[in-house]
Amino acid sequence: MIPRYSRPEMVAIWEPQTRFRIWFEIEAHATDKLAELGVVPKEAAATIWAKAKDATFDVARIDEIERVTKHDVIAFLTHLAEIVGPEARFVHQGMTSSDVLDTTLAVQLSRAADILIADVDALLAAIKRRAFEHKFTPTIGRSHGIHAEPVTFGLKLAQAYAEFDRCRARLVAARKEIATCAISGAVGTFANIDPQVEEHVAKMMGLAVEPVSTQVIPRDRHAMFFATLGVVASCVERLATEIRHLQRTEVYEAEEFFSPGQKGSSAMPHKRNPVLTENLTGLARLVRGMVTPALENVALWHERDISHSSVERMIGPDATVTLDFALARLTGVVDKLLIYPQNMRRNLDRLGGLHNSQRVLLALTQAGASREESYTLVQRNAMRTWEHGEDFLTNLKADKDVTARLSAAELEAMFDEGYHFKQVDTIFRRVFGEA
């Protein structure tokens, strides 16, 4: 994590003080249940809460202890004993380090998912507003980067809305997948701790019970979580790439907001570059790059090894912090996006009406020509338009083979722009609902 691409709320989830606070809560809730079951004194459980509930854990002191013990959880428990006193001997009864570490990671990733879901909600609201604003703003659709048939800019944004709506559903599912608790002891057999302790800690920490945890929570859950973040990042890049293309000088149909005093180039004062969406493309690459290590973490040895640990210490914070920043940045881009309908119109008309070629093709088949003949007639007039910059309708009217089947009036009807937009309302209802 670097401050340039970080937001405070998400960063806070991964700070050492937050992590140690969660560790304490897991240990204290477990001790409460152990006291209820008669395994440890109730007075000890009460003392642990009383002395450490509002404590600020000394991160430097824990690090100092860990340099000797070479074990992070033992270092924390040693420091907790310095705060709590003799009653600390009842903490961590029957538990293993992974019980604390894995359950903590589940809490952190769940909280991170909540922020990411809220981020997507804000993005959806921005996209929806702009989609309705430009519901019937005509623009050219492109396939292979080449003019195809007309769409509306609102439809482009409706597609993005539907995509991020799916992303939201995936994040909700990923949050549920990751939010499990394991307090099952060494190799996950509950030999030294009652399963009721796990159930209690899960309830108190807002998690579900992991059905079988060996000594760790199975990493297929984490793989699914980070894969979901990778998909969301790819959707961020898809919309960012569309905006980047539309901002190219030769297209110039949309543009990132360029604020007063902003500079585009150290050398060329005229430049207005799509730096935010280019940045989003790069951030998406980073998030996707963390998916493969998460997938490779699934295959741990036997009941437990720690080959996953170093990976998760990095990808947990980095992937969530980066995606949080990217979603917020994309929301700002969409919210302030400069849209130029006049340039869309200019580009739409640029090829002399060639975007109506399919309508003419279909009309010729309806008039009795074979599809092969119809395609040949339309294509030869289209190529003439391409190569000489002529008007497509004019060329069609001058082609006797075409006019033998279609009158001038019928050909002109094929160039009615409204024809292409007759189902826009239908698509919007599908995406946004009847309202």
Image: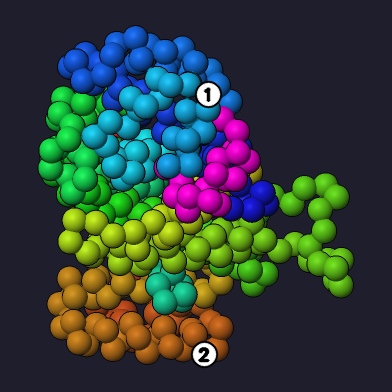
Q: 385 or 231: nearer the eye?
A: 231
Q: 183 or 168: nearer the eye?
A: 183
**Is residue 44 in view?**
yes
Identify the image quadrant of the C terminus.
Answer: top left
Residue highlighted by disc 2: 387
Residue 136 vertical placement versus 142 (above, below): above
Q: 169 or 142: nearer the eye?
A: 169
Side of 61 relative to 154 (left or right): right
x and y percentages locating residue 197 in the rendered image: 21, 26
Name the residue located 29 percent from the left edge and 11 percent from the top edge. Answer: 42
Side of 161 relative to 18 (left or right): left
x and y percentages locating residue 110 in the rendered image: 36, 37
Q: Quadrant of residue 196?
A: top left
Side of 183 relative to 113 (left or right): left
Q: Marks 1 and 2, Cα distance to the nearest angstrom?
A: 83 Å
- Magenta span: predominant SS is helix
Q: Is residue 420 magenta?
A: no
x and y percentages locating residue 431 in the rendered image: 31, 42
Residue highlighted by disc 1: 83
Three-letter residue code for mark 2: Glu
Name the residue located 48 percent from the left edge and 50 percent from the top edge. Answer: 69
- The answer to which of marks 1 and 2 sits earlier in the sequence is 1
- Looking at the rendering, the stretch of residues picked out in magenta corresponds to 57-73
Q: Residue furthest front?
A: 86
Q: Crowdedness of circle 2 by 10 Å Cα count: few (<14), some, many (20+)?
A: few
**Is residue 130 in view?**
no
Name the residue located 31 percent from the left edge and 45 percent from the top edge. Answer: 98
Three-letter residue code for mark 1: Ile
User: Mark 2 falls on what kind of element?
Assistant: helix
Q: 155 or 265: nearer the eye?
A: 265
